[in-house]
Image (cartoon, rainbow, N blue to C red):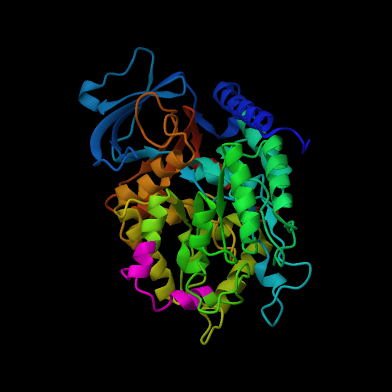
Amino acid sequence: MFSKPAVWLSVFTLLVSLWAEVGRASAQTPGPEVTPFIAINEPVVVLQHVRVIDGTGAPVRDDQSVVITNGRITAVGPAASTPAPAGARTLIYVGYTVIPGLVGMHDHLFYTASISVQRGADGRIGEPGLIVNEVPYTGPRLYLAGGVTTLRTTGSVEPYTDLKVKRRIDAGLMPGPGIEATAPYLEGNGTFAAQLHELDGPDDARRLVDYWTAEGMTSFKAYMNITRDELVAATSQAHKHHLKLTGHLCSVTWPEAIAAGIDDFEHGPVFTDTELIADKRPDVCPPGKAQLESWQNVEIESPRVRALIANLVAHHVAVTSTLPVFELSVMGRPPIQARVLDAMSPGARESYLTSRAAVSSVGSTVALPEATLRKEMQFELAFAKAGGLLLAGPDPTGLGGVLPGFGDQREIELLVEAGFTPVEAIQVATQNGSHFLGREDQIGTLSPGKRADIVVIKGDPVKSIAEIENVEIVFKDGVGYDSRKLIESVRGQVGIR
């Protein structure tokens, strides 16, 4: 298998991708695990008198009609001049807002359900390292309930589970978003995680890229201990298959990775770029919080940071914002929500609350200064204003308080806190992701011809971004799913299922 020419693997990948698209579009008979959550499933549907945020960054439009025909958007216009087609099911949504389905760009199908249990009294995690829980049942349901209609898994620990979930969703056998599946992490020597393979050189990196491409993965992620040579090999091999590679880096600095041809960075530089560390050793991830400390006294307007932003923009390298996972480590944040705790399994809830208490205790050594989170927010705003492609995703890891779906909504709220307007934040979470995935002609905005992936929100998130949480119906391919029923179906199970 590994000796197949790259061209045949590329053709195979293209055929798999086309097959998945056809399968998703043609799944017209939902299975018995999907039908209980369907609220609307007619050939022609009209959403009347809605407020439209179309995902392009354009101004909000009030009193609009959105026409859905056979899973596609066929019209968006003023309610007074956009008539309902004959036989359409007309739904009146006065006071409601519609936005495109969210495109989650750091949305794992696993979750840190027991982080406080795994840490010893000294804060260390014992052998064989951190273990995370796959959530193939609860994760897809919560993502869809939160308005996510397309997601990138951005690293997998159970790759065959992720691929099976993707294919079952595409076949209409389980509820969930369309999935762009990312291969297992490309990690180097010295990982802290029990479930990750450690590369033994560039040839191993190329081998794994070829293998997982043939298995159906559509993107790759480099991790903290990868070497520069391994990164160059993996990136080059991914590009031969016309696939992209992102990275949560540490051993390799951002400028080094840009030179290697990387396509995207996860989490932002304040948390993952080690270029500012004075004694940084090549191909070695510095211990502790060295990278955070190195960014502590650097101004975002400084020439060095401006040069980094210019370098990113010039090489068309995206950055994925994952503010919710870092907010967990800031004292007193985020606000505790009953819906989040109710969704967790009892063990996951106890683990999260224990970790939260440790962060919030007086003199905590594990708490993250709020100024660090603010600096990352400032960078992301400056990067976007400079023309950089900012993506969005929650990353349901860390201390365990970020859940699928709910975390995607929180990411939008935090982008607004960072200085983006609500319209801009929604654009980051919708159109920007579709652009990076090369699927702008299908998803990401509300315009005729696109898939009818639409989120119906009670209220106006422009006036109060917290209303982004008031999701009632999520259309995926023109089928409307009941958000509340999806959430209720996973109550008490996130972390064990």
Residue at image location 66% in from the left, 44% down from the top: 137
Q: Is residue 93 magenta?
A: no
**Residue 419, image x, y percentages:** 30, 60
Q: Position of residue 493 (x, y in %)?
A: 66, 53
From the viewer's perspective, tell me whether residue 306 is left or right of residue 237.
left
Outermost residue on the bottom side: it is 363
Return the x and y of residue 287 as percentages of the image width and height: 61, 76
Q: Is residue 331 visible?
A: no
Span shown in magenta:
291-307
Quadrant in which residue 94 is drawn: top left
Q: Quadrant of residue 308?
A: bottom left
Q: Nearer the viewer, residue 293 or 180?
A: 293
Total number of numbered discs in the rendering:
0
Q: Nearer the viewer, residue 316 or 489?
A: 316
Say if 370 sits above or below 402 in the image: below
Q: Quadrant of residue 450?
A: top left
Residue at 67% x, 43% y is 162
Decide: is 110 above or below 84: below
Image quarter where the N terminus lies is top right
Comparing 488 with 364, the one in front is 364
For residue 232, side relative to residue 45 (left or right): right
The residue sitting at the top extreme is: 86
- Magenta stretch containing residue 301, yes or no? yes
Q: Is residue 160 above or below residue 90?
A: below
Going by the image, does 109 lie left or right of 407? Answer: right
Q: Name the residue located 32 percent from the left edge and 37 percent from the top edge.
A: 54
Residue 484, image x, y percentages: 51, 43
394 versus 150 height, above or below? below
Residue 424 in sight in this render: yes
